[in-house]
Image (cartoon, rainbow, N blue to C red):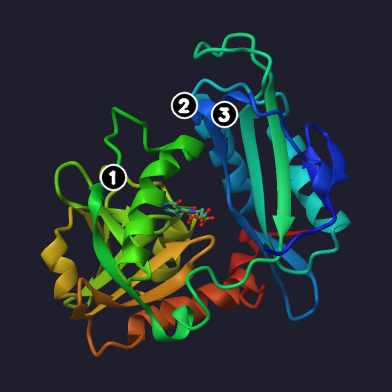
């Protein structure tokens, strides 16, 4: 794993190897914590820019609010701390992982009086789903695991413990020889990947599960919807069935880590011609142009380090 020099921990920059916690840390035992995944890209002019930083900070605080976690910093402090963490580590392009978690001063479930701690790490992180995933596409499997129910774990939050579900699905898919898992919701409709939202093209319309399908409200998903409006690609949100994916003309996954990853196969059925689709290519190119600062119309989504 790639490393960096410093990690921001509870307000201070500490050496990477000293950013440690006690084994009785509450979040380690029970999973109640919230986090974000953010990417920083380098522009042609060698400037480092963070993609949709404000939206990620807002989602972190919303996740915390949903779970009753009071982050002891203001959003603007976390915003600044993220930029500082990238800068001190002299990272040109990186992945940023802020996390708010419960400390070790309380035993048992009731979190009353517990310290809320915050860490921000950043490190270089290349392609999420394998070297050729962005060009050639990946093979996915519909998971035997069902995605969270909205009233068991509230799915608008991006919470640590929720990822048990994602890890089980991912591990199963990889052990079975696939690259990624797609989870269905408790009603049997397509929800999302283990760490990505999903889009597919059918009869010229780009479709994606609506936000009532227990999926995370992805910031890349939102960006794709806005990009498609500008490209005059019709996007529809709704309930999607597994067999609709089988007959799709194109499929792609979206996420901060996964970026725009084409899918070439679902449950051993070839999608389209088994290559990156035309619309996928168009959206992917537009996306990379924007994150690398080549489209002035979307400067609003970039924060300079
Ligand atoms: N669904 C899930 C379950 C999810 O974890 C992510 C992000 C998304 C959708 C896409 O959301 P967004 O990044 O806002 O477009 N997953 C993060 C964690 C991946 C990891 O392996 O850790 C990410 O992409 O950073």
Circles 3 and 2: CB distance less than 8 Å?
Answer: no
Image position, residue 220 (x, y; %): 48, 59
Q: Is residue 234 visible?
A: no
Circle number at residue 27: 3
Question: In the figure, 260 relative to 181: above or below?
Answer: below
Q: Earlier in the sequence, mark 1 or mark 3?
A: 3
Q: Is residue 225 visible?
A: yes
At horizontal 53% and vertical 12% (from top left) the residue drawn is 108
Circles 2 and 1: CB distance less than 8 Å?
Answer: no
Task: Check disc 3: other Cα within 10 Å, few if <14, some if 14-19, many if 20+.
Answer: some
At horizontal 65% and vertical 78% (from top left) the residue drawn is 294
Where is mark 1, residue-wise? 147
Where is mark 2, residue-wise? 66
In the figure, residue 117 lies in which quadrant?
Answer: top right
Left or right of 135, for residue 39: right
Mark 3 or 2, closer to the camera: 3
Task: Check disc 1: other Cα within 10 Å, few if <14, some if 14-19, many if 20+.
Answer: many
- Of the 4 image quadrants, the one containing the C terminus is bottom right
Image position, residue 128 (x, y; %): 52, 68
Question: In the figure, 24 relative to 11: above or below?
Answer: above
Mark 1 or 3, closer to the camera: 3
Q: Earlier in the sequence, mark 3 or mark 2?
A: 3
In the figure, residue 19 lies in which quadrant?
Answer: top right
Q: Earlier in the sequence, mark 2 or mark 1?
A: 2
Q: Secondary structure at mark 3?
A: helix
Residues at marks 2 and 1, CA–CA distance in whole angstroms: 19 Å
């Amino acid at each position: 794993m790639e490393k960096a020099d410093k990690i921001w921990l509870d307000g201070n920059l500490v050496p990477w190897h000293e950013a440690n916690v006690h084994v009785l840390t509450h979040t380690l035992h029970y999973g109640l914590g919230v986090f974000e995944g953010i990417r920083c890209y380098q522009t042609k002019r060698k400037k480092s820019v963070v993609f949709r930083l404000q939206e990620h900070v807002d989602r972190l605080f919303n996740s915390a609010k949903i779970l009753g976690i009071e982050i002891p910093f203001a959003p603007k402090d976390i915003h600044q701390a993220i930029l500082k963490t990238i800068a001190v580590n002299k990272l040109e392009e990186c992945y940023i992982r802020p996390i708010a978690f419960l400390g070790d001063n309380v035993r048992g479930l009731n979190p009353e009086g517990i310290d809320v701690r915050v860490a921000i790490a950043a490190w270089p992180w290349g392609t999420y789903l394998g070297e050729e995933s962005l060009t050639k596409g990946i093979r996915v499997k519909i998971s035997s695991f069902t995605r969270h129910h909205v009233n068991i774990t509230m799915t608008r939050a991006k919470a640590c413990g929720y990822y048990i579900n994602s890890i089980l699905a991912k591990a199963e898919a990889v052990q079975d020889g696939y690259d990624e898992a797609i989870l269905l919701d408790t009603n049997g409709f397509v929800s999302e990947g283990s760490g990505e939202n999903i889009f597919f093209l059918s009869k010229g319309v780009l479709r994606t599960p609506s936000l009532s399908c227990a999926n995370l409200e992805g910031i890349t998903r939102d960006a794709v919807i806005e990009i498609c409006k500008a490209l005059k690609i019709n996007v529809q949100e709704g309930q999607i069935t597994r067999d609709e994916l089988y007959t799709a003309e194109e499929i792609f996954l979206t996420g901060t880590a996964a970026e725009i990853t084409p899918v070439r196969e679902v449950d051993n059925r070839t999608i389209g011609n088994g290559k990156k689709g035309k619309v996928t290519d168009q959206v992917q190119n537009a996306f990379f142009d924007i994150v690398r600062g080549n489209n002035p119309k979307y400067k609003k989504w970039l924060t300079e380090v």
